[in-house]
Each structure stands twice: as C-alpha cells, then as structure tokens.
Amino acid sequence: MRHNNQIHHGLAIIYDVSTGWASKNNKDTNILKLSESQDNWSTDQAILSILGKMLQPLMELENDIIIPKQQKTKFFATLIMRSLNSSDPIKVIQEAVDLNRSIQGRNKIVSYVSEGMDMTAKDARLYINGLIKDSSYYKNYTKIKKPY
C-alpha cells in the first residue's frame, strides 16, 4: 500500500489474493475516480481537437480581414460563439474565410475596373455585376446552386 501511495499516488489497482478483489487503499473510490478522470480527459481531448481544427481558418481570417481593431475583436467573438453553437463549427468559420476572400476579390476587381476604365467604384461594381449576370457561367452556376 505504501508503494502504491508513494509511487502511484494511490491510483494503482492491487489485486488481493485473499479477497479476490482490488485492495482498498484508504480511498474506496479510487477506481471510480480513475474512470471519471479518463472520461474527463477524453472530453478535454475532444474539445481541444475541435478548437485546434478551428484555429487554422480563424488565423487565416484574422490575417486577411480588414476591419478596425475594436470591430475585429467583436467580430471574432461573435463568429466563434456562432460557430460553436452550430452543428459544424469548422465549416462556419471556413465559410467566413471564403466570404471574406470573395469580398476582397470583388473589391480588388472593382478597383482595377474603376481605375482602368475611369469610372466610379459604384459604377464599376454595377457594370461588373451586369456582365457576370449576363454570362453563361453565371447562369449555369445558379442552376447548380438552386435547391430543389
């Protein structure tokens, strides 16, 4: 018993030949506590795994998003809470990354067209939207995306 307490911190299961059961070592609930701690460890590991998978797209978004610091903190807090309340938190964050990338792409394209064709950003955006909506690619794309 002393060895169990000193070396194994009372967690070793010692088989007692005379009783045919694990020896009691001042704590009747050692086996139960060990089981509970293993369950807690498994739960902690699952939680950490989910958070770890969320980190990569969060960091990508954090590096790419262009908003003021005060808004950025609130935005990320809201995004994290919303994603954790969803059935797929990683997907929610990845969708935010994709949306941000699309917005930045649109802004860059509008900037090029605006400057290159000497028009306002608003006019360039409307012009680009019209060209896209008239394209066969857009028509095929929206057919695929429509839920039936």
Image (cartoon, rainbow, N blue to C red):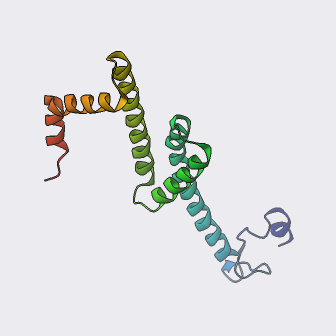
Q: Is residue 51 visible?
A: yes
At x 39%, y 60%, the residue is: 87
In this rendering, the count of numbered labels is 0
Viewport quadrant of the N terminus: bottom right
Specify whether 81 is left or right of 95. Answer: right
Instruction: Return the x and y of residue 60 as percentages of the image width and height.
Output: 52, 37
Q: Is residue 30 above or below residue 64?
A: below
The relative height of residue 43 versus residue 132 in the rendered view (above or below) is: below
Q: Residue at (39%, 24%) from the top-left corner?
A: 111
Where residue 102 appears, x then y in whole percent? 37, 35
Point 34% across, 33% down: residue: 122
Q: Quadrant of residue 131?
A: top left
Q: Is residue 112 left or right of residue 30?
A: left
Say which of 107 and 120 sits in front. Answer: 120
Q: Nearer the viewer, residue 128 or 51?
A: 128
Compare residues 123 and 20 and report the one nearer the observer.
123
Residue in front for this viewpoint, 2 or 114: 114
Q: Left or right: where does residue 90 sit relative to residue 45?
A: left
Q: Position of residue 104 (x, y in %)?
A: 42, 33
Q: Quadrant of residue 68?
A: top right
Q: Residue at the location (50% across, 40% down)?
A: 61
